Amino acid sequence: MSMREEAIVQFDNVGLRYGTEREVLSNISFTLFSSRFYFLTGASGAGKTSLLKLLYLAQRPSRGGIRMFGRDVITLPRDKLPAFRRRMGVVFQDFRLVDHLSAFDNVALPLRVSGVREADLREPVADMLEWVGLAHRAEARPATLSGGEQQRVAIARAVIGRPEILIADEPTGNVDPEMAVKLLRLFTALNRLGTTVVVATHDIQLLQKVPDSMIMRLSKGMLSDPTGALRYPPRREQNGARP
Amino acid sequence: MKRPPAIGDAVDRGLAPFRGRKASGLLPKARLGGPLPWVIAVMVALTVVASSGALALSNMVSAARGEVAGSATVQIIEPDSEVRSRQVAAATDVLAQLPAIAGFRVVPEEEVAATLEPWLGTASESEIVPFPGLIDVKLRGTGNERTYAAIEQALQQVAPRARIDAQAHWLAPVLSALSALKWMALTLIVTLGIVGAAAVWLAARNALGGNRDTIEIVHLLGGNDDQIARIFQRSVLLDSVIGGLLGFIVGIGATSLLARQFAALQSGMVAGGQLMAIDWVLIALVPLFAVAIAVYTARMTLLSSLRKSL
């Protein structure tokens, strides 16, 4: 990959426990570079969703350090977090569409939250719905959409703000294999435009469909690096240059 | 696969406010669907009635105090009517010479008899129960115990059983009772305000609980606490405006009805409790205060709850 890459996410010895239970994630250390495609794999209950929650700032770790876009997000005051979240796009495992909003309004939500004027968002949202093949379902409510359609609305919502990092939790879990391939093509198209993509999946077949992807494997809360690409600690030659 | 659409510079990554109809559309709540507008309507109606009562009582007390301040009644107690008449005349001479006295009026015996008629019967019976000679006195200034003692002493030179009663003295228990009623009404207003705020607090927490998923999504999409609070504030604002208006109309209706009932009493003291223009302005502010309290309470409740999330 010729594109210049920067370390945009760094996890340093991160641990996560809920309450007084034992840690669900232990000693997690890795670096994510811009414009890369990452798969996070692991069996159900391995801690994939917990790790993603830390990534999209829905959860603070119990220990360790996390840097994002060059800033320590652990010590960051919570009123500064929204600005970081706006640089990310998240596709949730259960889609988490707002039930009483149309597909159009769901996709427009990140732009509205970012303060984009109504006149400025109509066209990009319509284009985005067309891109995911749902232009004809723009006014449909999530309850009337199929699982695959809901998934595509969720993806459109995640990428409408052109995030620097796209995080998808089991995005192909609820769709047929044909749709899974289509969705993966959406992600790779975005990745080619420079968006870092992190896809959590337990579908091994999916990993082979993105040849340049890196794989992070979670097992019982511990992370392994089968492709040797996570490189932790990151090299000292900062300015983001990849080794 | 074609390229995803470009969105150009449309996305502003700043923290611009997320408001208006589209923002409030995030909450699937129908107008007047919840109890909040009705609770606010009841609170405002009761507060309008209590405020009107408090203001009327305050006016009544002020008017009565102003009327009796520096006023006194001289009583010439003498059973023999001829002697009494002489003593009254002599007393007026004494009063005319005292510098503390601004003016006086001898109350005609017929007037006294007419006043006491409901209790003592017709004037002819006054021969059986002799009336005291009465002189209404107006002092320069409000007067004090020493002034009254000096006047009484001077009067007793010509009428040994003369006594002077400051009207403020005998009216004091009545004024004190009216003041107590006024403070009770004010306490009621404050209590209603607290109860109203508590109702909004509960409604806001309930709305937060009922829309937790939507709030979490807005948070994760980069929405900040202020944006989320605004969405709810708008909803509470509309509810409280509707409730406030409704309560105001009911409250004013009840107040007018009460005012008419009291006016029918044709009592001088009650007439002093008439509401002035400024009072009506204050009463008109009640729904505005209710809306302000509701929106402020909702905002504080929401921000405090949201701060507990990441």
Image: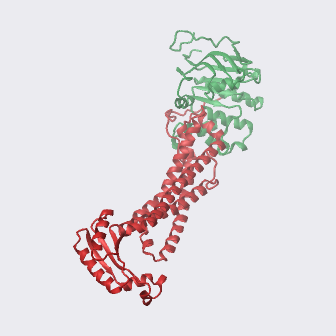
Chain colours: A green, B red
Quadrant of the image occupied by residue B61: bottom left
| Front-most of residues A136 and B266 | B266
Q: Is residue A17 above or below residue A123?
A: above
Q: Is residue A241 above or below residue A44?
A: above
Q: Residue at x 51, y 66 (%)?
A: B252
Q: Is residue A208 visible?
A: no
| Front-most of residues B303 and A174 | B303
| Front-most of residues B119 and B296 | B119
Where is residue A226? Give x, y as percent.
Answer: 71, 12
| Rendered-image quadrant of the N terminus of chain B | top right
Q: Residue at x 44, y 60 (%)?
A: B282
Quadrant of the image occupied by residue A6: top right
Where is residue A154? Give x, y as percent.
Answer: 66, 35
| Front-most of residues B27 and A151 | B27
Q: Residue at x 55, y 39 (%)?
A: B303
Q: Residue at x 66, y 19 (%)?
A: A15
Using residue A210 as the reference point, say whether residue A10 is left or right of it: left
